[in-house]
Image (tube, rainbow, N blue to C red):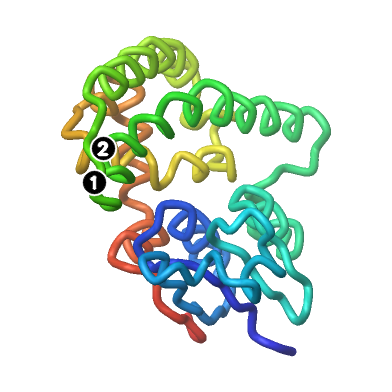
Amino acid sequence: MAILKLYGDSHATCTWRVATVLYEVKVPFELVHIDRRKGEHKTPEYLEKQPFGQIPYIDDDGFILFESRAICRYIVAKYPDCKLIPTDPRKNALFEQAASIELCNFELYAGTAVFESRGKPRKGLKTDQAALDASLAALDAQLDVYNVILAKQKYLAGDEVTLADLFHLPHAPVLERDAKSDIMMRKRHVARWYKDLLSRPSWLVSEDGVKTTLEY
């Protein structure tokens, strides 16, 4: 069987997200580095696979898939023993609820903050401090609700970690490092949950820089 190929930048946020799940599930993969500074994500060859010219995408024995969350779901569906997506109807519904929370109530604001604090400087652009402050303030309000949920259970979908929790990586750590914000540590239950995610070996390896990994 061909080794899954991950096309992306080893220090790009969405590449980190996919790699974290690959490491979590222990899937062998080859990283094919895409140098965005050289415009390799905008070449005709790349756009044939990823028409939006974004990273990453995967090639799994000829099956091409892009969008980091879709890739993560595919990996988990292919290796269901990891149990990162529950199969019980009610538990699965709670997982889908948690996944929607991440996308609509976390990513919506964290994504803007990450772009302003990390994305723009990496492109040589100036951070819009007002936009950064506004996105962090809006996210802080959302995390008040996270704190209520996490006071009742260990993770967003219950007492077992799911893909919905892992989806918060890597943007949450970027807020701490690049936006210089303590937003993930201000609320007791959010901080406990966040520290748990940061301690996972799959994230520790990803954060150090995604590398081709053929054995675990």
Picture layout, residue 154 above or below residue 208: above
Q: Tell me what residue is drawn at x 22 percent, y 37 percent.
A: 126
Q: How far apart are marks 1 and 2 (CA)?
A: 7 Å
Q: What residue type is labelled 1?
A: Pro
Which residue carries the number 1 mark?
A: 121
The picture places residue 29, in percent across and down from the top left corner, at 56, 79
How many numbered tags mark residues here?
2
For residue 49, side relative to residue 145 (left or right): right
For the N terminus, the image quarter is: bottom right
Q: Is residue 8 above or below residue 189?
A: below
Of the two numbered discs 1 and 2 in the rendering, the one whose residue sits closer to the viewer: 1
Image side of residue 210 versus residue 21, left or right: left
Element type at mark 1: helix
Q: Are marks 1 and 2 in contact (CB under 8 Å)?
A: yes
Q: Quadrant of residue 130?
A: top left
Compared with residue 37, is residue 174 higher up or lower down, i.e. above or below? above
Tell whether 112 sits left or right of 187. Answer: right
Point out residue 199 in the picture as x, y percentages from the top left corner.
Answer: 31, 50
- Check disc 2 and report the residue beneath it: 117
